[in-house]
Amino acid sequence: MNFSERKRTVDNVIALINAKWNNHVTMDVQSYVNVSTVIRFTDDRFGEWFSCPKSVYNGVGHPRTTFEKKSISHKLDMSEILSRIESTHNGKVVLDESTFKTPYVKARFVDFEHGGQHLETFGRAGDTQFEIFNKNQKV
């Protein structure tokens, strides 16, 4: 623990947490000892969890907050997905957009070069060997 952390008061820690989390996270003030001791926090959306104040004011929130941030950062818009398919297959494979939900759920792809329609996830359709898998899974 460095010198500045030893001087942090409850009000100082609350101000840092509010600045980082826009007043969506509250700290159990009665259990506060120092910035390195694990105490209870409450997130407006996800409920209670336990962490040390130092982690919370440095940006580590409720465990479900982390999952939410990751899922938002991995979302692709339809134009990006279509451009990736086009660049990989040069127009020989097309996505039926009406069947697409997420990159991880099977959707219908039409293979013009080898004929047929295939149900596959976007990750597999991005594979350059699209024509060799799921030949028996014609739709």
Image (cartoon, grey):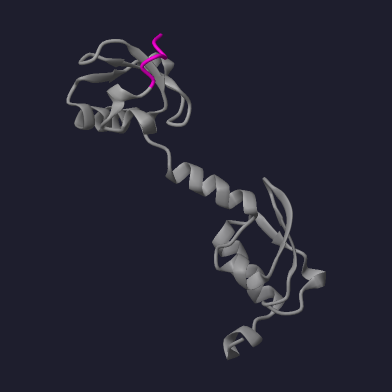
Residue 36 or residue 109, whichever sits in front:
109
Image quarter hosting the N terminus? bottom right
User: Outermost residue, bottom direction?
Assistant: 3
The reply, left or right, for residue 38 in relation to residue 65 is right
Q: Residue sitting at 58 percent across and 58 percent down?
A: 21
The residue positioned 55% from the left and 45% from the top of the image is 68
The image quadrant of residue 22 is bottom right
Q: Indicate the quadrant where residue 75 lies.
A: top left
Question: Residue 10, percent across and down?
Answer: 71, 75
Residue furthest right as drawn: 30
Of residues 102 and 48, the one drawn nearer to the viewer in this rendering: 102
- What range is drawn magenta here? 134-139
Q: Position of residue 127 (x, y in %)?
A: 30, 33
Q: Is residue 16 left or right of residue 115?
A: right
- Residue 18 at what x, y percent from top left? 61, 62
- Determine whether, in the image, residue 28 is placed left or right of residue 103: right
Q: Residue at x 73, y 76 (%)?
A: 37
> Farthest residue toward the left?
90
Residue 106 vertical placement versus 43 (above, below):
above
- Magenta span: predominant SS is loop
Question: Split into 4 quadrants, where in the image is the C terminus?
Answer: top left
Q: Residue 19 in magenta?
A: no
Point out residue 73 in the picture as x, y percentages from the top left corner.
Answer: 43, 45
In this rendering, would 4 be left or right of 30?
A: left
Quarter of the view holding residue 93: top left
Q: Residue at x 31, y 24 (%)?
A: 132
